[in-house]
Amino acid sequence: MKLKPFTQQVRGALVSSIAIFSLFSSVNANAAESALNGILSSGELKFCFESGYIPFEMTDKNGRYVGFDIDLAKQMARAINVKFVPVNTAWDGIVPALKTGKCDFIGGMTITPERNLSVNFADPYIEVGQTILIAPKLADKIHSFRDLNTEQYTIATQMGTTGAEAAKKYLSRSKIDLYDTSADAVLQIVNGQADAFVYDFPYNAMYEAQHKGKVVHLDQSFTYEPLGWAVRQGDPDFLNFLNNFLRQIKGDGTYQRIHDKWFKSDDWVNSVQ
């Protein structure tokens, strides 16, 4: 085997090293690009959610998006002097929307180990759990989720949610029907097509209040579910911003004021669709 002259070997090694260094520099530069840079340069804070999640994300009778999550995101935009841009997205496409840059972060998402493989979460901003709405005719028979875990009952819930996961885990003997939206799923009880509906406590509590006599709320949560803002992976600067923003509004009373508006008052109920 014929060896190359020493100078040619050195030159080749240098060229290879420079190419590798340039590649890694490019990768590192892209990885270091925070969503904050895009938010500040565009002057917009794009927030992904799925309208219909009571009382977090809803549409009022004038077509405007309202709710607990909406108000928190608006407050965040005001805090850094940018425009709030709501991005209403079907739940099954919400993570892809985040990853492709259609929005900067997601609200109303339960933190789970499986989801953490696809997104990063800021610290929890509220804790909820799964509860159950049942048909009034079952009020004397069903007193907890355990009573529903038989083949004779049909459970409705929304696909892709922790409600669906809880139903499959704790009500595996029941017939479980999955629907595209929470509104479609809960309607099955009212229409007599399902015996129970599994979903987040705040949603179920509000739904019962709005539909008295049509459903009964078993209000004891049987899961623990912290909600957190989801962001693209590899963005510690944005996570730091979100966590510090949450700490600030909890400390100055803003969080409590917004929380009480949506969870301790029903003044808004008649204004939503």
Image (cartoon, rainbow, N blue to C red):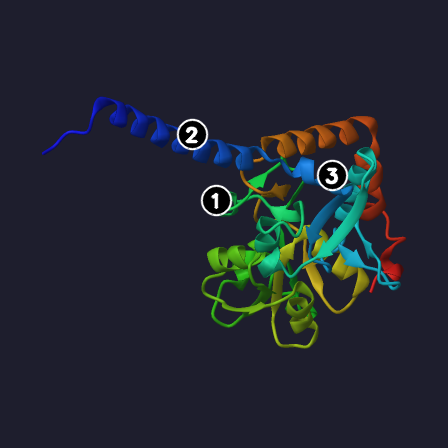
Proximity of marks 1 and 3: CB atoms separated by less than 8 Å: no
In this view, the mark in front (2 or 3) = 2
Residue 52, x across and y down, in percent: 73, 60
Residue type for callout 1: Leu
Q: Nearer the viewer, residue 43 or 120?
A: 43
Q: Please say whether residue 227 is visible from this viewpoint.
A: no
Q: Residues within 10 Å of mark 3 (few under 14, many from 20)?
A: few
Q: Residues within 10 Å of mark 1 (few under 14, many from 20)?
A: few
Amino acid at circle 3: Ser
Q: Quadrant of the N terminus?
A: top left
Residue 21 in the image: above or below residue 211:
above
Q: Residue at x 54, y 33 (%)?
A: 29
Q: Which residue is mark 1?
A: 117
Q: CA distance from mark 2 to mark 1?
A: 29 Å
Q: Position of residue 151 (x, y in %)?
A: 47, 70
Marks 1/3: CA–CA distance = 29 Å
- Element carrying mark 3: helix
Q: Say what amino acid the circle numbered 2 marks.
A: Phe
Whether pointer 2 and pointer 3 mark residues with C-beta atoms closer than 8 Å, the reply is no
Q: Which residue is mark 3?
A: 41
What x and y, as percent, mark residue 192?
A: 65, 77
Q: Using the image as rendered, state which of residue 54 and residue 223 is in the foreground.
A: 54
**Given the current orientation, which residue lies at the most extreme left position?**
1
Q: Is residue 185 left or right of residue 25?
A: right
